[in-house]
Image (cartoon, helix red, strand yellow):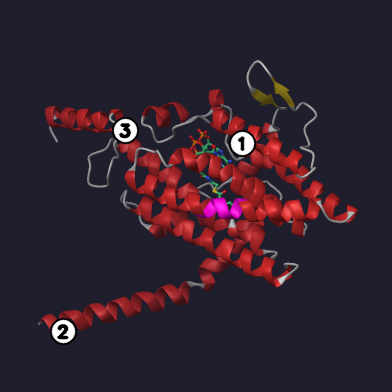
Amino acid sequence: MDHQSHSAEQARFEAIIAAEEKIEPRDWMPEKYRRNLVRQISQHAHSEVVGQLPEGNWITRAPTLRRKATLLAKVQDEAGHGLYLYSAAETLGVSREQMVDDLLDGRAKYASIFNYPTLSWADVGAIGWLVDGAAIVNQISLCRTSYGPYARAMVRICKEESFHQRQGYEIMRTLAAGSAAQKAMAQDALNRWWWPTLMMFGPHDAESAHSQQSMQWKIKRQSNDELRQKFVDQTVEQARHIGLEIPDPALRWNEERGHYDFGEIDWDEFQRVLNGNGPCNRQRIGDRRAAHEQGAWVREAMLAHAEKQRRRAAGRAA
Ligand code: FAQ
């Protein structure tokens, strides 16, 4: 492409972004915009898929049939979210095989939160309430992202996540209103999941490598710190409502800011988890690798079936 038509394409791209319209797969886009989206959307997809593992651990031990059926449906929804997101990333010219290989070989990240263990039934409640709650705050904002297929995937995902958040909160509310042991189990889960949940929003804005460019391109619509604050403000009230205590002595309402002030995250712990040394990193990737290997025959059978259909159609056309 010559220089003049390249700058005309660039100007058109910028005009679409400025007009709050969507960039679609057929549109010209800067290579860095494409690569940044592939990075974020594929990591988002991996998070949904790896995110099935901590809760999946409790499907066989759910306390009632109702809880078991609900948890099964929720975990299955997360697999669906992974599929919508892999499909959105595929529209940017990257194959699903490549994305999955990047995850299994440790080249791609997934959300740090899923490297923590689920030690009790209350952890299933805490994940729904806090982790899905944080995911919704982030994803509502992403419904307005500038890339069309990503924005549309987010709309459906948010609707489902909102059920997930409520099922988690309902588990926590039930436990918090139960026996002393049940309430203690709920409080213990909140104590362990609170800080890792705050880490889900990523590093502080000043430390965030991609934020400035992503905000300019409207891939991200609100900053990491803005979204984290929004989550804290809404969750403190929810905890109070069910009589649980947020494990942060620095937490207090700031009248001037109109927000809660809260303590500093342990960023060393965040980096350790990102570098593969969290409590469950090896187990999570090991489980994903095993699932991928054990699923090879399904992929082969599907491909053989598609090939057979193709041959049959070609035979009919001849
Ligand atoms: N964990 O420059 P930034 C869910 C990485 S879905 C791991 O600020 P960015 C549903 C980041 O990738 C949860 N890595 O990056 C569910 C980058 O590394 P790179 C997933 C993190 O992209 C619920 C580097 O640090 N949601 O929970 C994390 O502008 C229950 C520098 O950071 C999404 O992915 C982290 N927490 O902002 C499922 C939402 N934070 O790529 C099952 C979409 C940062 O240069 C059960 N993603 N990093 O090697 C986003 O909104 C953004 O990508 C952020 C990070 C906000 C996560």
Q: Nearer the viewer, residue 180 or 222?
A: 180
Comes first in the chain, label 1 or label 2 = 1
Of the 4 image quadrants, the one containing the C terminus is bottom left
Mark 1 residue type: Phe
In the rendered image, residue 64, in percent from the top left (x then y), is placed at: 73, 70
Residue annotated with mark 2: 315
Query: Quick one: SS at disc 3?
Result: loop
In the rendered image, residue 70, in percent from the top left (x then y), is placed at: 62, 65
Q: Residue at x 64, y 64 (%)?
A: 56
Find out whether residue 134 is within the magenta segment. Answer: no
Q: Main secondary structure of the magenta part?
A: helix
Q: Residue at x 59, y 42 (%)?
A: 134
Asked if residue 292 is positioned above or below residue 169 in the image, the reply reads: below
Q: Residue at x 39, y 38 (%)?
A: 145
In the rendered image, residue 4, in percent from the top left (x then y), is placed at: 12, 27
Of the 4 image quadrants, the one containing the N terminus is top left
Residue annotated with mark 1: 231
Please report contact status of discs 1 and 2: CB closer than 8 Å, yes or no: no
Name the quadrant containing residue 123.
bottom right
Query: Quick one: SS at disc 1?
Result: helix
The magenta region covers 160-165
Comparing labels 1 and 2, the label whose residue is closer to the camera: 1
Comparing labels 3 and 2, the label whose residue is closer to the camera: 3
Mark 3 residue type: Glu
Comes first in the chain, label 3 or label 1 = 3
Mark 2 residue type: Gly
Comes first in the chain, label 3 or label 2 = 3
In the rendered image, residue 23, in percent from the top left (x then y), is placed at: 28, 40
Asked if residue 193 is positioned above or below residue 227 in the image, the reply reads: below
